[in-house]
Amino acid sequence: MAGPMPLLAAEGLTRRFGALVANDSVDLTVMPGEIHALLGENGAGKSTLVKMLYGLLQPDAGIIRWKGDAVTLPTPKAARGLGIGMVFQHFSLFDALTVAENVALALDDARPLRAVSDELADISRAYGLPLEPRREVWRLSVGARQRIEIVRCLMQNPDLLILDEPTSVLTPQESEGLFATLRTLRAEGRAVLYISHKLEEVRGLCEAATILRQGRVVDRCDPRQQTAGSLARMMVGAHIAEVRRARAEARIGPVRLRVDHLSVPSEDPQGTALKDVTLEVGTGEILGIAGVAGNGQDELFAALSGEVRAPEAGNIVLEGTPIGWNGINARRRAAAAFVPEERLGHAAAPRLPLSENALMAGHAKGGFTRRGLIDRGRMLGWVDAVTHAFDVRKGPRDPEARALSGGNLQKFVVGREILGKPRLLVVAQPTWGVDAGAASLIRQALIDLAARGASVLVISQDLDELFEIADRMAVIFHGRLSPAYPAEDLTREAVGLLMGGEGFGPGREAA
């Protein structure tokens, strides 16, 4: 007797980009009422696969079957017409428009705005995704913005919902709310294809998983029967080293960085001003700053790096010297180093080779010039040293930054700064969007840097990361910073409540 028919079946899907085979004869089956994880390290082919399933790319070979029938998906509109919806990792919303206006713009059929508002309100209530149709998007939290993306997908009545890293910007409480919604969809017989690097949430949510490596399917499993470690090994094909750190009290010394009552307006009209931020980072300490995106993290990084000057020189003090008025180069000469969140465009110039990117970051401290001339040999030697120490995988010896995958470029950027032996490192989202192997390497490098006596300030939305590496943690919310507490005294729930604004008083609306 035949079993139930798959909702979606990919058979031998292949997609090439020149000589690169991004997907090599990939088979994938998603059943009705199933939450199915799609796992793999950076560059494994996950994004290429789901783009073919959503009509953004066309396969070079293979068949897509929908409810048993072979189909062609020339556009996302064709995919939505069949019943396939997708919520991307990066939101596509107009901040100045209302929730209802953003939803109306995304619908394939024209509807009166009042009808859109009424249906939106009904769906948001039915699925536990609270939204106010008339609220402007710029007033909303990141969690509420994600709810908009999901609701406008649900308004197309999909049978399959594809989610790409949906919890990467959510508090733990918001993540639990999302999981409840997904379980409701499953109970209705809808399916979810779920992409995530957070393996513990995959284990708790998904009943099936397909694992990609280098464009090929290497395993299928029930993640509930696996550990996070075994899933990671399937993804990378090797054992993932456990991150280890020394006891904090054995190594933390005097305060090296002090930020004192720092208030800075945002240069973005819809950004978040810093309000009376005070913090200290000791010698050999890792201080973690948690928070949902858009709560002042960019402004804090810019103030610490010198991209934006502080109102008073004494607002920022490094090793006893006021540096609030100093620029980036002066701060680098004082043995500070910086890794911004945006690796391509901010941390690295896309069209320049790695050696010239190293020069731009390191010229303030010297070492790459001799008698007034650029020493290309030293620059290439630096690239080689970073490549070896941080396992940066690339083709040519000195490729353009844009030629590296996201995870390998991140390893290069972090390694470039750490090998400079800074006494202070400020890093934003150090493992954003990188696979388990690269994340483990980067986190261990930060721990080892602090163990050698450097002070490290990590701004991250990943609570698992902060609990793994931080000695103390604080939370930023609407530009204000909570006190810092020993990480061992905190729980995810307590930090999540702070991330949602509990204890900070009135501020911008959360929903």
Image (cartoon, rainbow, N blue to C red):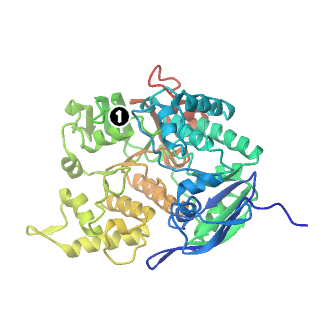
Amino acid identity at mark 1: Gly
Is residue 442 at least partly visible in the picture? Answer: yes
Name the one closer to the observer, 235 or 50. Answer: 50
Image x and y of residue 466, in percent: 51, 45
Name the residue that disc number 1 marks. Answer: 271
Mark 1 secondary-structure assignment: loop
**On screen, residue 337 above or below 280:** below
Please report the residue visible at 40 percent of the width from the left and 73 percent of the height from the top. 394
Is 147 left, or right, of 32 in this rendering? left
Is 70 left, or right, of 114 in this rendering? right
Q: In which quarter of the view is residue 30 placed?
A: bottom right
Question: What is the residue that sits farthest to the top in this orientation?
Answer: 506
Question: What is the residue that sits farthest to the right in this orientation?
Answer: 1
* Crowd rating for badge 1 (residues with CA inside 10 Å; few <14, some 14–19, many 20+): some
Image x and y of residue 297, in percent: 39, 39
Please report the residue visible at 66 percent of the width from the left and 57 percent of the height from the top. 37
Is residue 25 at least partly visible in the picture? Answer: no
Name the one closer to the observer, 462 or 404. Answer: 404
**On screen, residue 56 above or below 238:** above
Name the one closer to the observer, 206 or 228. Answer: 206
Please report the residue visible at 37 percent of the width from the left and 45 percent of the height from the top. 283
Q: In which quarter of the view is residue 403 placed?
A: bottom left
The number of numbered discs placed on residues in the rendered structure image is 1
Image x and y of residue 258, in percent: 32, 36
Is 131 left, or right, of 309 in this rendering? right
Please report the residue visible at 71 percent of the width from the left and 65 percent of the height from the top. 69
**On screen, residue 446 above or below 218:** above
